[in-house]
Amino acid sequence: MRILVPVDGSAPANRAVAHAIGLARGRDDALIVVVNVQGPETIEVSDVSAVMSVAADRRLAARRSTSALRKAARLCTTAEVRFETRAELGPIAETIDRLARELQVDQIVIGSRGLGGIGRLILGSVATKVARLARVPVTLVK
C-alpha cells in the first residue's frame, strides 16, 4: 500500500501524516510518500523576485521544502513506518496528482485548513482541487 501525503508544515498537514501513519502501521507493504510542492502559489512574486535567477528561486524552494518536510519525517521516524520524502516544483494540486499517478499510490491523505465557503471561493483549496483531480481515494484531514 502506497500513501501520498502532501505537506506544507501546517498543523493540518502534520495531522494528515499522523493519519497516514495509523493506516500504515503494522503493514509490511506500506510506504508513506511525504511530498512538499513549491510553486507559484508558495513563492512570492515581487519586483525583487522578478530579477532573481532561476537558481535562486530553486534554492528558496528547496529551503522551504526542507522546512515543511522536517516535522513529517520526524513523525514517520518516531512511528517506525517506512517512508520517503520528496520535494517538487510546479502547480501544487496538479503536481500532487501527477506524482500520485507516477508513483501509483493507493491513496492520498491531505490536510485541509478548513477554509469556509467564502475563503474557498476566493482562494480556492488545494485539497479540494486534489480531490477533484485524483483517480485514487483522497482523505481530507482537518
Image (tube, rainbow, N blue to C red):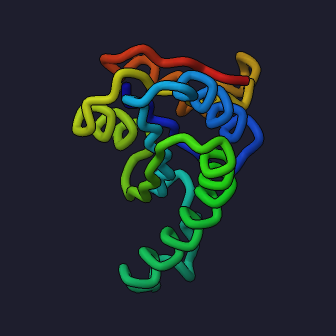
Q: Quadrant of the C terminus?
A: top right
- Residue 65, position as x, y percentages in the image: 54, 62
Relative to the observer, which residue lies in front, 127 or 47? 127
Tell me if residue 61 can be seen. yes
Residue located at (41% from left, 17% from top):
132
Quarter-wise, where is residue 42 in the image? bottom right
Relative to the observer, which residue lies in front, 56 or 121? 56
Residue located at (70% from left, 40% from top):
14
Would you say 40 lies left or right of 113 here?
A: left
Quarter-wise, where is residue 81 in the image? top right
Q: Residue 70, relative to residue 22: is it above or below?
A: below
Q: Quadrant of the N terminus?
A: top left
- Residue 88, position as x, y percentages in the image: 39, 56
- Residue 45, position as x, y percentages in the image: 54, 66
Residue located at (62% from left, 57% from top):
68
Relative to the observer, which residue lies in front, 121 or 35? 35
Q: Residue furthest left?
A: 102
